[in-house]
């Protein structure tokens, strides 16, 4: 019985072995199916992987590098690539800084760092937010070369697959070199060499330890951390990189602390101010018109003067900060150009980061009385003289009764006095007498390109134009009567130095007779000396005109010396009225502050003085009644115009014209 009992107990171990076999069998089956599922998932995500055969030919946008007149970099557009570098050519601390910050186990993992992923998951769970990433340098390279920045499971799986392919295809040093040559470092730069040249003015092979730390800190957030945008933030990040190098054993603590003393060097990286971008954007629009659609990198030499730009920004910014709030003046613009039309400074608004709308080149606003020089110019060309008398009196045209700014009338005054005091009624009378078509033709000939209203209100500047357009149209008065088309580009080259475009010629040629330009300058100098723009007096020969529109919505001052033309506009984007701002107040003050510094160091020059041409009144040929016959080109310039009313004879006491009467009161703006 005992033997039988022992025999009956033997099957139990066999049952245990059967349960173990059962578990192993099902584990194997589940493992097989899990493997199939994983392989299927990998195949699914790998199905639309990008073509890796085109690694060497990754497409990029051609870059445009704009240079100021002094050769400094004004702005860059597109993708900027430097020279390809090899690890052996770089200082050892360059790759060390990158590895210490981005991927310390780079030479130990196979493209995907499982320990790094686990560490990142732990740190993120512990912090309750994403504080650390688990992507390796190889994965980052895969994303930058082949994928988008989308945060999706598909992208992460494809990133890992491509990282494995890169590790199989290249050595570790080759992967690191490709990364350094292709990753984005901010400010439009791709590759460490382009970044080193952009930020430090030297190739990557010559950067120092602190500069290497700055560069290694950029891939995390290149747009936010680049030293041109925020030197302090870039310096903080460089300090973190140096600390990482100490932790990783690449540096001693003393070496890191010594390198951090170079933080002040970042303050010297004077990147282009945001305000420069108004000019740069305007100039960029002109590039295609000269060389067509860019297919290679371009270097564009411009007329931009950094010193004048800084002065312009300071003048506009200070005035708006000090006076803008109490005067309800929210925006301003300033454009300064050489008399030949080369734009040297452009302020398109008070803050480019806040608004990229360029009020200097894009805002169509009524110029008000700043348009009157074209009316007076047309009058002179039809026989009127600066000393010709005209009566300032009430005027009525149908249901419209234009008034002077202060509501007063001066009676009989000279034409020059009327312009200096910006008398509205005289401007309207002149348009009536010489004809609105003649005024429109004169304005267009001078350089106004906008459509002008064909009615008497044109005399008061009711047709809209831009500040840069007005500056270009008045520049001939500072340019001896020669036309000036506003331009920004002097030369365009490709990256090899081949010239694709170079500005030649002098513009449209003569658009107004020198003696007429001289008379206009003498009259408009009176605007500054005794008229509505006394706040613009800079103590040297200058001429200009104020302008204010209805309800103080726009205020202008356009002024020039023989060397520089500048137009200032102040107003609000939504057209809200300002509080009593006239062209002779805030804009004239901005112009004076800018001009006084702009011309400092240059000797004062008078405007050319020409003897007035004699007026010959002769019977005109049929179809040209009242045509001016003072010179051959005058007769050819106009083909069909309203007949001018002959002005009264000019009184020239002592041979010198008496333009202004000092006892007259102000009657316009």
Image (cartoon, rainbow, N blue to C red):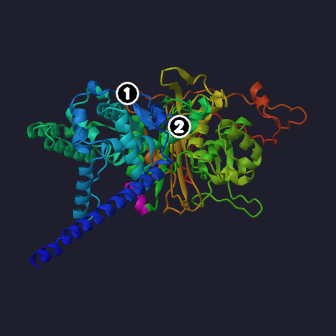
User: In the image, 188: left or right of 26?
Assistant: right
Percent of width and height locating residue 366: 61, 53
Is disc 1 placed on a helix, strand or loop?
Answer: loop
Q: Which mark is residue 564?
A: none
Q: Nearer the viewer, residue 566 or 413?
A: 566
Percent of width and height locating residue 622: 91, 34
Q: Quarter-wise, where is residue 516 in the image?
A: top right
Measured Cα–Cα span from mark 1 to mark 2: 30 Å
Q: Residue drawn at (61%, 22%), measured in percent from left and top? A: 505
Q: Which mark is residue 84?
A: 1
Q: How many marks?
A: 2
Circle 2 residues within 10 Å: few <14, some 14–19, many ≥20: some
Q: Nearer the viewer, residue 649 or 616?
A: 616
**415 drawn magenta:** no
Quadrant location, the N terminus: bottom left
Q: Nearer the viewer, residue 281 or 293?
A: 293
Percent of width and height locating residue 621: 88, 31
Q: Residue drawn at (75%, 47%), measured in percent from left and top? A: 436
Residue 551 in view (yes/no): yes
Q: Which residues are magenta?
A: 321-326
Q: Circle 2 sits on which residue?
A: 283
Q: Main secondary structure of the magenta part?
A: helix
Q: Foreground mark, 1 or 2?
A: 1
Residue 585 in view (yes/no): no
């Amino acid at each position: 019985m005992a033997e039988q009992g022992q025999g009956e107990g033997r099957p139990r171990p066999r049952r245990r072995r059967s349960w173990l076999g059962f578990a192993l069998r099902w584990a194997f089956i589940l493992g097989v199916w899990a493997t199939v599922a994983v392989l299927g998932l990998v195949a699914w995500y790998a199905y639309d992987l990008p073509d890796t055969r085109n690694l060497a030919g990754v497409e990029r946008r051609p870059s445009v590098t704009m240079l100021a007149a002094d050769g400094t970099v004004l702005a860059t557009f597109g993708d900027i690539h430097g020279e390809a570098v090899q690890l052996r050519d770089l200082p050892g601390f360059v790759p060390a800084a990158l590895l210490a910050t981005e991927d310390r186990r780079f030479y130990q993992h196979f493209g995907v760092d499982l320990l790094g992923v686990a560490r990142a998951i732990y740190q993120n769970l512990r912090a309750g937010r994403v504080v650390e990433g688990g992507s390796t340098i190889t994965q980052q390279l895969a994303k930058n070369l082949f994928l988008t920045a989308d945060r999706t499971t598909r992208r992460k799986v494809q990133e890992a697959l491509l990282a494995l392919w890169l590790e199989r295809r290249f050595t570790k040093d080759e992967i690191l070199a490709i990364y350094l040559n292709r990753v984005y470092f901010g400010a439009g730069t791709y590759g460490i060499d382009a970044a080193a040249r952009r930020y430090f003015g030297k190739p990557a092979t010559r950067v120092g330890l602190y500069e290497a730390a700055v560069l290694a800190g950029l891939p995390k957030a290149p747009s936010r951390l680049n030293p041109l945008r925020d030197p302090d933030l870039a310096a903080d990040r460089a300090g973190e990189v140096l600390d990482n190098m100490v932790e990783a054993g690449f540096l001693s603590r003393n070496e890191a602390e010594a390198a951090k003393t170079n933080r002040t060097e970042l303050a010297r990286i004077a990147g282009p101010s945001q305000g420069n971008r108004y000019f740069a954007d305007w100039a960029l629009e002109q590039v295609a018109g000269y060389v067509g659609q860019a297919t290679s990198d371009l270097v564009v030499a411009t007329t931009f003067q950094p010193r004048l730009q800084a002065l312009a920004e300071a003048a506009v910014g200070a005035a708006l900060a000090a006076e803008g709030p109490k005067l309800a003046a929210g925006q301003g613009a300033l454009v300064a150009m050489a008399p030949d039309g080369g734009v040297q400074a452009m302020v398109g608004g008070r803050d480019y980061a806040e608004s990229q709308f360029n009020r200097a080149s894009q805002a169509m606003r009524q110029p008000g009385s700043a348009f009157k020089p074209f009316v007076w110019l047309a009058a002179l060309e039809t026989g009127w003289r600066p000393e010709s008398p005209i009566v300032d009196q009430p005027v009525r045209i149908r249901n419209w009764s234009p008034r002077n700014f202060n509501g007063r009338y001066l009676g009989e005054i000279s034409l020059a006095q009327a312009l200096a005091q910006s008398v509205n009624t005289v401007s309207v009378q002149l348009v009536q007498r010489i004809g609105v078509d003649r005024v429109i033709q004169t304005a267009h000939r001078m350089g106004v390109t906008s459509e002008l209203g064909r009615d008497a209100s044109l005399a008061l500047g009711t047709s809209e134009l831009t500040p840069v357009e007005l500056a270009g149209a008045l520049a001939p008065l500072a340019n001896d009567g020669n036309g000036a088309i506003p331009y920004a580009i002097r030369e365009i080259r490709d990256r090899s130095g081949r010239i694709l475009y170079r500005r030649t010629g002098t513009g449209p040629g003569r658009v107004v007779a020198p003696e007429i330009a001289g008379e206009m300058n003498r009259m408009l100098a009176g605007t500054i000396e005794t008229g509505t723009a006394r706040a613009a007096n800079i103590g040297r020969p200058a001429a200009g005109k104020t302008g204010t529109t209805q309800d103080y919505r726009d205020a202008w001052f356009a002024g020039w010396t023989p060397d520089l033309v500048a137009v200032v506009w102040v107003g609000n984007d939504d057209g809200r009225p300002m509080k009593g701002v006239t062209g002779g107040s805030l804009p004239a003050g901005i112009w004076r502050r800018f001009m006084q510094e702009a011309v400092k160091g240059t000797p004062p020059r008078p405007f050319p003085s020409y003897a007035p041409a004699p007026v010959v009144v002769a019977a005109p040929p049929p179809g040209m009644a009242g045509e001016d016959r003072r010179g051959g080109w005058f007769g050819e310039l106009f083909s069909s115009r309203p007949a001018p009313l002959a002005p009264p004879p000019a009184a020239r006491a002592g041979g010198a014209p008496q333009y202004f009467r000092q006892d007259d009161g102000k009657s316009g703006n």
